[in-house]
Image (cartoon, rainbow, N blue to C red):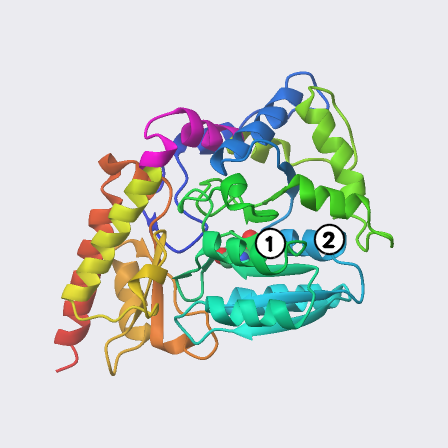
Amino acid sequence: MIFSRLLVIPGPIEVADEVLFANAHPSMSHVSPEFVPVLGQCIRMIRDVLFTKDAQPFLISGSGTLGWDQVAANLVEPGESALVLNSGYFGDGFADCLQTYGAKVDQINAEIGAAVSQSEIEKALKAKKYKVITFTHVDTSTGVLSDAKLIAETVRRVSPDTLVVMDAVCSVASEDIRMDAWDLDVVLTASQKGLGTPPGLSILLASQRAVKVFETRSTPVTSYYGGWNKWLPVMKAYENGVASYFATPPVNLIYAFHESLTQITKASPSIENRFKLHREASQRVKNAAIELGLKQVPLDPKHSANGMTALYYPEGFGAADFLPRFANRGVVVAGGLHSSIKDKYFRIGHMGITVADSTRGDVNSIITALKEVVAEAKSQRV
Ligand SMILES: *Cc1c(COP(=O)(O)O)cnc(C)c1O
């Protein structure tokens, strides 16, 4: 590790040294014959991470949020209806973004710590025709994991034409996602969470069904920079080994992303083992929390993320008792984010290299710090 502090917030996460070194690549022309295949291979490798054969990736400078803009600007025409399954902070954001582009948005709000129930989804889809339905796979504000497969199945059964859009910013590469088998239309993410790359890249994959919906829209796309009319030819060209230009790609970050994708898709542990390692690490952290008497934000362990843990402070304690004590131990965790419980809980990320490379001992460090912090906070209170 280049830097001795352990960054275990739910993104950005720890980045492998090889990825950092790749980011330090000498400056390159974005249309050079050396760089073109690097971006082309990233397009192919991200398909492997999501188990899709023919979805269309869009790799664009930006953050995860740009994925929301792409969905709102390319797949929903002004005045069309969108249904947002809201399981926390990021549902609010997606709804706000869709409205910004003129969509009519309905929301189903889950209770804090829960996912939206299948019966509510079914009821809403029967009552009204929606162009898209969006949900957050792992809501980073609560650690709630939605059942992506079940949601997609439900939509296909009740409203087959509705596009199924998954905000997977906090789940790609830490949760098992089968884009083709589950029939998801959009999976959107960012570089800095489970994909273990510095921030700065918006990553979105669109099913051929979604691409078709985009191609047959009747009104113009409502974004300039985020328009797929601009990016689709560029992505196709790079995948075919041909340079093309709309706006400069983040060349160095693409080198870093390429290295991280190579580790995830071609090196050890295998991607399946990676998911297993995330589940095991998560269980270890959650078991330690249970032993310490800390309550999780997710109400049902089945709906609890494997790449992060959200824990309520013990009664009478708050961020000031916990976060500086973690920091004193060189462990950086995150405070609360969901507005209704913001001061009542904290979040620990355990994604990427932190769980995939056990020689680092990161999970042990997290658990040791957690135990020490709880003990110290309690002992100094009495
Ligand atoms: C982090 C996150 C976002 C936003 O991503 P940025 O890269 O910060 O723009 C959106 N959705 C979820 C679920 C996230 O965890």
User: Does label 1 or label 2 sit earlier along the sequence?
Assistant: 2
Q: Which residues are magenta?
A: 258-273
Residue situated furthest top in the rendering: 33
Res. 129 image quadrant: bottom right
Mark 1–mark 2 Cα distance, whole angstroms, equals: 10 Å
Pointer 2 residue: 75
Label 1 sits on a secondary structure element that is strand
Crowding near the residue tagged with mark 1, few <14, some 14–19, many ≥20 C-alpha atoms within 10 Å = many
- Residue at 66% across, 69% down: 96
Query: x%, y% of residue 217?
Result: 82, 50
Q: Main secondary structure of the magenta part?
A: helix
Residue situated furthest right in the rendering: 219
Label 2 sits on a secondary structure element that is loop
- Residue at 31% across, 35% down: 273
Crowding near the residue tagged with mark 2, few <14, some 14–19, many ≥20 C-alpha atoms within 10 Å = many
Query: x%, y% of residue 69?
Result: 69, 56
Residue 271 among those drawn in magenta:
yes
Relative to 184, does residue 118 appear above or below in the rendering?
below
Residue 37 visible in the picture: yes
* Residue 199: assigned label: none
Residue 132 among those drawn in magenta:
no
Relative to 339, does residue 213 appear above or below in the rendering?
above
Q: In the rendered structure, which amino acid carries the disc numbered 1?
A: Val
* Residue 165: assigned label: 1
Res. 27 image quadrant: top right
Relative to 73, does residue 272 appear above or below in the rendering?
above
